[in-house]
Image: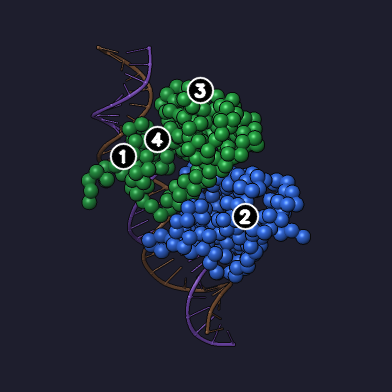
Chain colours: A green, B blue, C purple, D brown
Amino acid sequence: MNSTYIQHINSKVKLSKAEVVLIQKHIVHKKIRKKHYFLQEGDVCKYTAFVEKGLLRSYTLHNNGNEHIIQFAMEGWFIADLYSFLSGEPAVYNIEAIEDSELVLISKPANDLLLQQCPNYQTFMLQVITNAYIALQKRFNAIPHLTVDERYQNILQQYPTLPKRVPQRMIAAYLGITPETLSRVRKRLQQPK
Amino acid sequence: MNSTYIQHINSKVKLSKAEVVLIQKHIVHKKIRKKHYFLQEGDVCKYTAFVEKGLLRSYTLHNNGNEHIIQFAMEGWFIADLYSFLSGEPAVYNIEAIEDSELVLISKPANDLLLQQCPNYQTFMLQVITNAYIALQKRFNAIPHLTVDERYQNILQQYPTLPKRVPQRMIAAYLGITPETLSRVRKRLQQPK
DNA sequence: AAAAAACGTTGATTTGAATCAATAAAAACA
DNA sequence: TGTTTTTATTGATTCAAATCAACGTTTTTT
């Protein structure tokens, strides 16, 4: 049985057996435990991680010490500091496992090689990054014209399991509001009208 | 002399003469006048536009009637409703020329063909979309922890010519603030301390 | 060139979320 | 299992930006 990662690529672009072998040769499986860091701000992001199992988050810390969560990555998602990965500059994001997780790691050299030698891999990556861009634009677009209440409902709709898997304060940090405000949002939404 | 568009691609990936000819065969040059629309919300985005000259903006309208500007696109930038372009669904963005502009249009069929038949074109596109993603993430990341004043200074630094080319209220709409607030920001920044 | 529309500034008031603060509840730990 | 640490809720207060409003200026239109 192939890894979830290969299956995932194969569901988007049809891979030959040779391509499967090539990809398999260049990826590394890794488990990471809850609360452990996949990446810390200041380090170079040496790998892109595909989440086979579990849940991680990327975030930045601000002057005042509070966090802004950039992304939650669940099964089937990628997570990395893409700029750091591509440029070799120090990362600006921290990436932490929220649950015990199983990752597939792709190093920069492996990624370069696969992009060059496996056209289907490049096609796949173009799809992945395009989807990520569209999703981010959609999220970005929602900020100025939706109320906080609507933004919370949006995220619930998009990730119904999220409240069961992450503490409320992280959802607040993702929405860019304080935990107190989120608590009040939830209260408002419980008492409809 | 090749079009700016070909030069632009060629500066990122080395194109063969055959590739240049192929690309040239599949692009269309178009001029668009100030205040005219390249795309209107509800229509399908049939083309991606590369800006050879001029300046455009993409924006959405909200209930209350005010605009949120998603992107300014100057010389050397792409602009489109990417989701609509790729999916064929109606666009959610309006794209309007702020100045008389010269565009290179790439249709969906042309794009598909070039991605398939011209590996360098695919490599180029992967770079373009990756850079766009990183830029958007950076912009997104700046929102929660920078003050409005800092965000205005950021955009000035990034696009020093912008205030000369677009009305102030559009910069406000880009920053997600009201024109009144931007006016006050500018006043504050003029009187240092 | 005159009229109309859009734009930018300034002031007064309102408002939604942040902050400060205290307490209860749940989770992590030793 | 009991203790400590994190998390969630609720209330009071503050604050930054939105809104409402008025007015002069610039730009566009005819």
Q: Nearer the viewer, mark 2 or mark 3?
A: 3
**Label 3 near label 1: C-beta < 8 Å?**
no
Q: Residues within 10 Å of mark 2 (few under 14, many from 20)?
A: some
Where residue B62 sits: x, y (%)? 41, 60
* Labels 2 and 3 within one chain: no
The residues bearing labels 2 and 3 have C-alpha atoms spaced at a distance of 39 Å
Residue to which mark 1 is pinned: A183
* Labels 1 and 2 within one chain: no
Which image quarter: residue B107? bottom right
Picture disc at residue B77: 2
> C2 or B184, which lies in front?
C2
Subunit ID for the residue under disc 4: A
The residues bearing labels 4 and 3 have C-alpha atoms spaced at a distance of 25 Å
Residue to which mark 4 is pinned: A170
Q: Nearer the viewer, mark 4 or mark 3?
A: 3
Quick one: SS at disc 2?
A: loop
Q: Residues within 10 Å of mark 4 (few under 14, many from 20)?
A: many
Q: Earlier in the sequence, mark 4 or mark 3?
A: 3
